[in-house]
Image: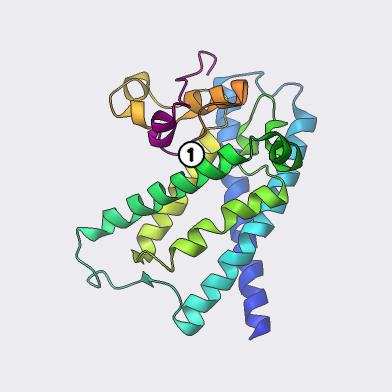
Amino acid sequence: MLGAIILSVLAMTAIVSVRYLAASGLFAFVTNRVRPGYHAKLGTQIRKEIGWSLASAAIYGIPAGVVAWGWQALGWTRIYTEWDAYPLWYLPVAPMLYLLAHDSWFYWTHRLMHRPVWFRTMHAVHHASRPPTAWAAMSFHPWEALTGAVVIPALVFLIPIHVAMLGMVLLVMTVMGVTNHMGWEMFPKWLVHSRLGGWLITASHHQRHHEEYKCNYGLYFRIWDRLCGTDRGLSPNA
């Protein structure tokens, strides 16, 4: 049993690592084409971002691997594979519940990590990326990585979700995590400045967090930032 768990952890670590390298590499390539020179003189920073991110991938892989093994071997979790196990209307509801729950957790843990002691101990690693790049998506101190690594493994015990919809959640996590750190806005202005865009977090919103630190703490949505008065809008530099 222990051997199977270790293999599952190693497999999940490899998957998270490859997912990070592929997604960040792709959007870093796009950045070099759209913003030539953006990465100039950032070689040392980027190498550190990749190093911290791969360490974070290992931390994410541990709970993910244990839970994946438990799901397959012992029927843990509320992940299901039959399309008719729940009403079809529930398929898109589950990912939204996951994203809202993750966003809430992230907002409050992120805001906590901006308190001086927590910032110096953990979060300063992430903010060492000045300016942030696509490679900074998982550039966290191990303790900070741990706060993010437990969210989805915990949610699969609480909220039923089809395995394909769980894949959709992971895709959104990956794309938003990378694109929010590119330093430039990839989404069209008509969306970013629309009524819907006013509730979504994209690069121009998160860029302002990296510029001013004490604002714009959300991950996917601006709900908590607006409710708590920490939303300062979009950065003019993204």
Helix, strand or loop at mark 1: loop
- Residue 152 magenta-drawn? no
* Image location of residue 181, percent across then percent down: 57, 32
* Image location of residue 80, percent across then percent down: 35, 71
* Image location of residue 39, percent across then percent down: 68, 24
Task: Give the side of residue 117 with respect to residue 152, left or right.
Answer: right
Name the outermost residue toward the bottom.
1
Q: How many numbered marks does the figure carry? A: 1
Crowding around mark 1 (Cα neighbors within 10 Å: few <14, some 14 to 19, many 20+) is: many
- Residue 235 magenta-drawn? yes
Q: Quadrant of residue 88?
A: bottom left
Instruction: State the residue at coordinates (64%, 55%).
Output: 146
Q: Give the color scheme: rainbow, by chain, secondary structure or one colour.
A: rainbow
Instruction: State the residue at coordinates (44%, 31%).
Output: 228
Mark yes or no: residue 85 visible. Answer: yes
The type of residue carrying mark 1 is: Leu
Q: Is residue 224 above or below residue 86?
A: above
- Quadrant, the N terminus: bottom right
Depth order, front residue of 232/182: 232
Query: Mark 1 sits on what residue?
Result: 219
Task: Give the side of residue 151 with respect to residue 16, left or right.
Answer: left
Depth order, front residue of 27/61: 61
Name the outermost residue toward the top.
236
Depth order, front residue of 223/135: 223
Q: Is residue 192 above or below residue 151?
A: above
Mark yes or no: residue 185 visible. Answer: no
The chief SS type of the magenta part is: loop
Q: Quadrant of residue 140?
A: top right
Task: Give the side of residue 53 with respect to residue 175, left or right.
Answer: right
The residue stretch that appears in magenta: 218-238
Instruction: State the residue at coordinates (37%, 19%).
Output: 189
